Amino acid sequence: MVEAIGAQDAFSARLVELAGFDAVYLSGLTSTASFLARPDMAFMTMSERLQIAHNIAQAVDVPVIADAEEGYGNAIHMMETIRRFEEAGIAGVHIDDEKSPGKCAFLPGIPKNTLISVEEMCGKIAAAVAARQDPDFLLIARTDVIGTVPKEEFIAKGMIEESINRSQAYLEAGADAVFMYCVTPEQLKRCVEAIDAPLVTLAAESERTYGETFPITTFDELGYKIVISALGTLYSGAYGALEGLKAYKKSGSWQHVNRIDKEVFDTVVRTRDYAPLYKKFSIPE
């Protein structure tokens, strides 16, 4: 099982890598929050997301999985999206079956999403398969059935079955893996029983999401292949920054603020990689 920890820029991606995690996840929600200080409501363009994706891919040596939204258009646009993310050095993307413009399903007060037809989504997946150049570039299909109704209705009506049926169709269309959003242990198990393909899921690390908080070993024991923690670095980093600013505001001295030291900072930005180059390439001082 691979743990993909969310990052919103190259710096946070380096922190994920230095902490020893397997992969980096570029989330639509966190990148929009960091880049624009806006909610996840399709405010970012593909070019803006791609710039962040490229920067992250260049900064780390671990694989990067990115949120490619709904492919930024129809099946034709999907082909361009896949080419561009692959060129950016991303290891794989997930694509969603929401109608554009999509939005995060868990934003308070924001209406729920609607989905495109299974046939249209299968066409977009087929287009993605046709567009990719590297067969190892991972195409993950994600259905947002859960984003169309309140959590209670999703559970009461057994709508995980609709998620499974859609996901089966997307695998037949050529997806390599499917992203299953589950909110109970029973749903996690049901997906494993029903789907004979690599499963991706989200670890609920915030009250914002619908899911229960499971130990990471739960996913491994059930057989999930990729588990994404999207919000971790954004939420913990924002907490640290805000508390640090409050401490400085109160004390008037940065010496009273918990922070990384210069050695850690220089490790993150790889300062030591560049110092020897001045002598090696005869760069004037």
Image (spheres, rainbow, N blue to C red):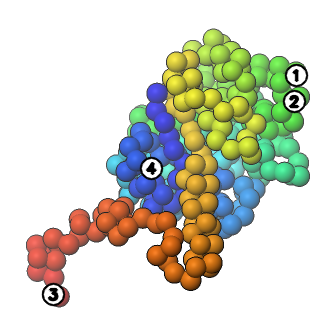
Residue 152: numbered disc: 2
Q: Secondary structure at mark 4?
A: helix
Q: Which residue is mark 3?
A: 284
Amino acid type at circle 2 is Glu
Question: Badge 2, how many Cα within 10 Å: few under 14, some, many 20+?
Answer: few
Q: Which residue is disc 4 drawn over? A: 16
The numbered mark, 1 or 3, whose residue comes first in the sequence reads 1
Classify residue 130 as left or right of residue 265: right
Residue topped by disc 1: 156
- 131 lies left or right of 143: left
Q: Quadrant of residue 276?
A: bottom left
How much space separates mark 3 and mark 2, taking CA atoms?
67 Å
Residue 79: assigned label: none
Residue type, numbered disc 3: Pro
- Asked if disc 3 and disc 2 are in contact, CB closer than 8 Å, the reply is no
Q: Earlier in the sequence, mark 3 or mark 4?
A: 4
Label 3 and label 4: CA atoms lie apart by 35 Å
